[in-house]
Amino acid sequence: MAVLFVVWASTAAVLQVKLAPITWADLGPLRPRLEASGLTADGFASYVERLQRDHLQRVREGDLDHLVFYLLQSARFTTEPPIEPAVSAKALIETLDPPERQRFLKSSALPAARIPAPVRARIRALTRALDQPDDDARLAYFRGLVADAAGKGDARDAVLEREYLRVMRFVYQKEFVAQRAERPAEAVADLYRTRGLSTDTAVEAGYLVHLGLAVAKGLQPDRRIRRVLIVGPGMDLAPRTGFRETPPESYQPWAVIDALVSTGFAVLDDLEVTAADINPRVVAHLRRSALSPPTLQLTTGIAAREGVSFSSDYREYFDGLGARLTMPARAPGVSEDAGGHLHKSVRVGAAAAKVLRAEPLDVVTERLTGAPFDLVIATNILPYFDDQQLALAASNIAAMLAPGGLFLHNEARPILGELTAALGLPFEQARHAVIATVAAAPAPLFDSVFLHVRR
């Protein structure tokens, strides 16, 4: 039975939105593949229930990951110097003797006394700051998160110490252990399929979408896109790299709206973009943004320094980013900070804000019902799922697409192409997006975008 939600849409009208849980029957042509991997009709309902519980825990762990990155890097609550997370992980773990290190990398168990003194000082400063009245958006968010995890008093320090150790274990495995594996990229991918579900987002992801839409426009020059679904838009709460003290923001929905209009696929008064995220904090943030249009502080995660140079195409994209979000339409000016990061400020207009709505969605275990979408975008979210979960997500995405609808993503696993082909959503085109070149490096900094069309 579908679950019914009543939400306040960005158009200030009350709309009814249904979430339908996935069933064995929904999987159609994927059932033989899943049966071969040991998943059957009899065990499917309990499997989905386990996934839902696991994903809730992964959302919580993802939030706590961001809390640790904030704890280490923010200057908002302390004068202690910031600590880069990977540096902290290396300093902590490489002081352990080999047996102790092995035990830690298996369980993240370690006496709190082994936590470096600068980290303990930051933990104490953060717990003091959480007790003070403050309207800082990040502090308010983390205050509630820590309260849920620990309550009051000294227990909060213990929670922060435990989460610090857990996060340092993951960072060390990703940045140092996996890099020494025979196939480093595969080792990192394996880690991501069990880690917390991060809300990380970056301005660079918008370039992928813009490039993919330009490719699609070339294939279907007369096509009009009216209904769009963004899976996992995320929010820049407290990333591990590129941390800034600016208020948290979700970039991708606005970049998608801007790209759809700039490529000629859509016009603002005939467009509806649904941003669907498993994290309720992201959904709540986007609903507020749709009702009270934000001023976006867009800063590149990559910096032009030490031999790094932006590609001309990426620089052109960033120069024009946000022009279709403002009224009248104009490209906000670009500046470059001392560290080589490009920056611009974009004030979202009311016309663009009316386009956006936000919904809760676990794309592996459920789908949105109702009118199908002309376009589904899922970037930097599919790597979190193993092959079985990816099959369920692909089935839900295919079911939410209209005939002829487009699916745009950046997941390079060959199995996704096999799954989508079986679902009548075959691969059509791919493009590599070069964002920057690095002097003396074997390859530029790039990502790939893949386009499928629903038959």
Image (cartoon, rainbow, N blue to C red):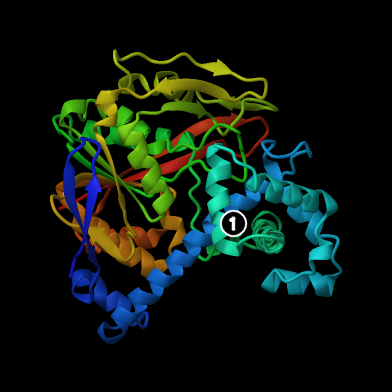
Q: Which residue ends up furthest to the bottom in the rendered image?
A: 42
- x 19%, y 47%: residue: 373
**Pointer 1: residues within 10 angstroms few (<14), some, or many (20+)?**
many
Residue type, numbered disc 1: Val
Decide if residue 418 is on the left or right side of residue 347: left
Decide if residue 208 is on the left or right side of residue 78: left
Decide if residue 186 is on the left or right side of residue 379: right
- Residue 414, image quadrant: bottom left
Secondary structure of residue under mark 1: helix
- x 71%, y 59%: residue: 157
List x then y, in percent, for residue 252: 39, 37
List x then y, in percent, for residue 33: 30, 75
> Is residue 208 at all visible to an observer of this figure?
no
Quadrant placement of the N terminus: bottom left
- Residue 129, image quadrant: top right
List x then y, in percent, for residue 418: 31, 62
- Residue 56, image quadrant: bottom left
- x 34%, y 74%: residue: 48
With respect to residue 352, does 281 lie above or below? below
Mark count: 1
The residue tagged 1 is: 146
> Is residue 47 at all visible to an observer of this figure?
yes
- x 80%, y 69%: residue: 111
With respect to residue 421, does 86 lie above or below? above
Q: Name the residue nearer the viewer: 417 or 225.
A: 225
List x then y, in percent, for residue 420: 27, 59
